[in-house]
Image: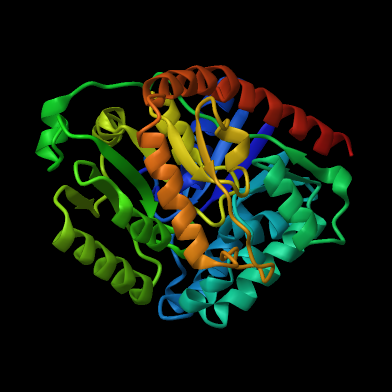
Amino acid sequence: MRVDFVTKEYPPHIYGGAGVHITELVKVLRNRIDARVHAFGSPVVEPGTFGYQVPTELEESNSALQTMGVDLLIADALAGADLVHSHTWYANFAGHIGSMLHSIPHVVTAHSLEPLRPWKREQLGGGYELSSYIERTAYQAASKVIAVSNGMRNDILRSYPDLDPGKVEVVYNGIDSQKWRPIQEPDTVRALGVDPDRRSVIFVGRITRQKGLPYFLRAARELPSDVQLILCAGAPDTEEIKLEVEQLVAELARNRSGVVWIPEHLPQHKLAALLTNADAFVCPSIYEPLGIVNLEAMACGVPVIGTATGGIPEVVVEGETGWLVPIEQVQDGSGAPIDADKFVSDWAEVLNSALASGKLKSFGQAGRVRAEREFSWESIATRTIEVYQRALGD
């Protein structure tokens, strides 16, 4: 079986969970099937992996048009594949066109949904209408749609009510628990500006509306004075949210010590050391299909405090591996809390309760066990091949 993957992200160009998912899944699948990768830009040089640049004629165009130009080049290159598997709207157009052109099934993995990210209009302008059109068209025509959580499956069917529920299947994201493991390196932590002898909570993620960082920064005002705040946060979506985060961080730094902001993308080993050193990992997302970052933290033996939304409750077990913060959300697709002040207050309350619970270590150990047992890439690969077989049989 030859399966061609289409993706915007692939090493060395990874900036989100979708890129991690594809990288790890392909690594395992290549031991079982002929898996080829078609990626945007210049990916790592390896057999069966190909890169595609934006056509010269579109270099000054809207970014959505640039994406479509790359996708057309990829669609042509899918000849000979038995099945095409695309990830995110950036790749969905190539998968859809390639499926029609070469008469092969198209499987889509949903890592996010355009209708639930209306703030993308801030980035893409009219291109958001194109990205939404591409995603909707690809999902409706796909042979199978893979959701990375049951919560994500519900979001897909709510966003696209004409979709046949029978073709939407759940396959979780995974974690390499040998790579992501507890790493006790106080010198590495100290070199990054963190005091390994003080308590700390850590956030890891891009600065986007969906990650909910501004809400967490407001809640962090209530943290005990001895707790450090570690922010591995970069790649802001817009200047507006970048400025908002900068102002909130500056305010915290004026009123407390131990506020450490690391904007660059850290090497995995250093990030694992930071996670291991932390007392708790925070995931204040208001939209999160699953959250690989939560799995990475759990695999490093860190308890997780996350918003009770999307796929987070399927990863973080309340009262066993972490804590969940309640949220009531508006139904306009943004995921914003109905009462932002209450959401911030609830976050502050759960944070302080967790830090005072005496359960941080035992919850972290339980999280490590859960990550190893339930989310291995070997099991995710097996489940994915089963979806391929059903798609080829339909």
Which is more toward the observer, 360 or 313?
360
Residue 210 seen in the figure: no
Residue 24 seen in the figure: yes
Query: x and y percent of residue 39 in the render?
Result: 49, 50
Q: Is residue 330 left or right of residue 259?
A: right
> In the image, what residue occupies the spot 29% across and 73% down?
243
Query: x and y percent of residue 193 in the render?
Result: 12, 43
> In the image, what residue occupies the spot 60% across and 63% down?
335
Q: Is residue 351 left or right of residue 308?
A: left
Q: Quadrant of the N terminus?
A: top right
Classify residue 293 by image quadrant. top left
Q: Is residue 45 left or right of residue 278?
A: right
Q: How is the image coloured?
A: rainbow
Query: x and y percent of residue 321 in the render?
Result: 50, 27
Query: x and y percent of residue 338 in the render?
Result: 60, 67
Q: Is residue 233 left or right of residue 118?
A: left
Examine the rendered structure and indicate whether residue 335 appears above or below residue 306. Answer: below
> In the image, what residue occupies the spot 74% across and 47% down?
153
